[in-house]
Amino acid sequence: MKRNIRGWLAAIIFPLSIVLGYIIYTYILGSPSNFEGGSTLNEPLKNNYLGVIYKGGYIVILLISFQIILLTYIIERFFSLSHAKGKSGNEEFVKSVKKMVTDENFSTIIKQCDEQKGSLANVVKNGINTYLLVEKDDTFDKESKLITIRNQFEESTQLEIPQLNRNMVIISTLASISTLIGLLGTVTGMIKAFSALARVGAPDAVGLANGISQALVTTALGISTAAVAIVFFNLFSSRIDKITYAIDEATFAVLASLKEKYLKS
């Protein structure tokens, strides 16, 4: 169900962002009230930044759509990683798991995993359930039991990591491509500016101003979008690293305790 929702999100957000970008560009930024004489052909009113952004040209539509996509996936990642972290802090959960494994209180661990939820709880629960299963199977020797439990921990971890990193590539791609599209607007704007300057007779002052405006506006939008994407990419990457570290720590603690238990028996 969650995968279907995420699939629909990706299928809808990209075309929808283009449509919203066009609407914002045409009807909000391009509102006649933002320009002298009520015409988009004239200069923007003094201190009217909506009109200034409109003068950035059609590339602004693409940059606005990037901002909408970025905002959508920032929200998605925030809630997904908050859910993956679980209800309480991972450090406290790992400490309680270590203690309960030492006390061989496995039923309580499973109950606490159900309450905690999240990626760490899923991995620990799968590992403990595997331990309880192999303990009842007399065909396993001690070494085989440890190998089976370790493999279950590894498989569960490998299933959780792609979910943690989901859509991170979209945020990183937006960080890269926003700057490039902004620079594309800069190049096209400067082409217009120099074309207006190179005309025979008196230079086209309006054309020159529009070209320079497009160059500056698209650069500013591209860089600002990329900066926000980089900040949140690093923020989310840090949160993912903390979760994966907690998973590795819990896995090591459980396996070490079980190995010690088998050596004593």
Image (cartoon, helix red, strand yellow):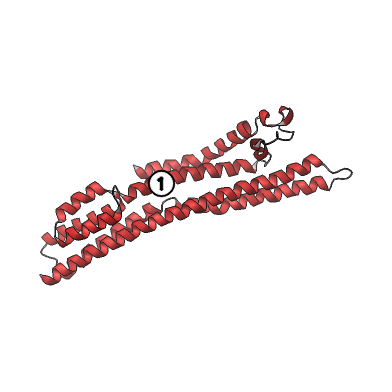
Q: From the viewer's side, name the closer residue of 113 and 130.
A: 113
In this view, 40 is above or below 264: above
Q: Position of residue 251 (x, y in %)?
A: 26, 62
Residue at image location 25% in from the left, 60% down from the top = 152
Mark 1 closeness class: few <14, some 14–19, many ≥20 residues within 10 Å: some
In this view, 165 is above or below 5: below
Quarter-wise, where is residue 55 in the image? top right
Give the tally of numbered discs.
1
Pointer 1 residue? 78
Residue at the farthest front position: 47
Q: From the viewer's side, name the closer residue of 85 and 265.
A: 85
Q: Position of residue 75 (x, y in %)?
A: 44, 43
Residue at the farthest right position: 201
Residue at image location 27% in from the left, 48% down from the top = 117
Quarter-wise, where is residue 213 in the image? top right
> What amino acid is found at the position of numbered circle 1 in the picture?
Phe
Q: Which quadrant does the C terminus fall into?
A: bottom left
Q: From the viewer's side, name the closer residue of 235 and 166.
A: 235
Quarter-wise, where is residue 33 in the image? top right
Residue at the farthest bottom position: 263
Q: Is residue 9 left or right of residue 263?
A: right
Does any portion of residue 123 appear in the rendered image? no
In this view, 259 is above or below 132: below
**Could you say whether the residue bearing mark 1 is in a helix, strand or loop?**
helix
Does any portion of residue 241 appear in the rendered image? yes
Q: Is residue 161 left or right of residue 33?
A: left
Q: Position of residue 211 (x, y in %)?
A: 74, 44
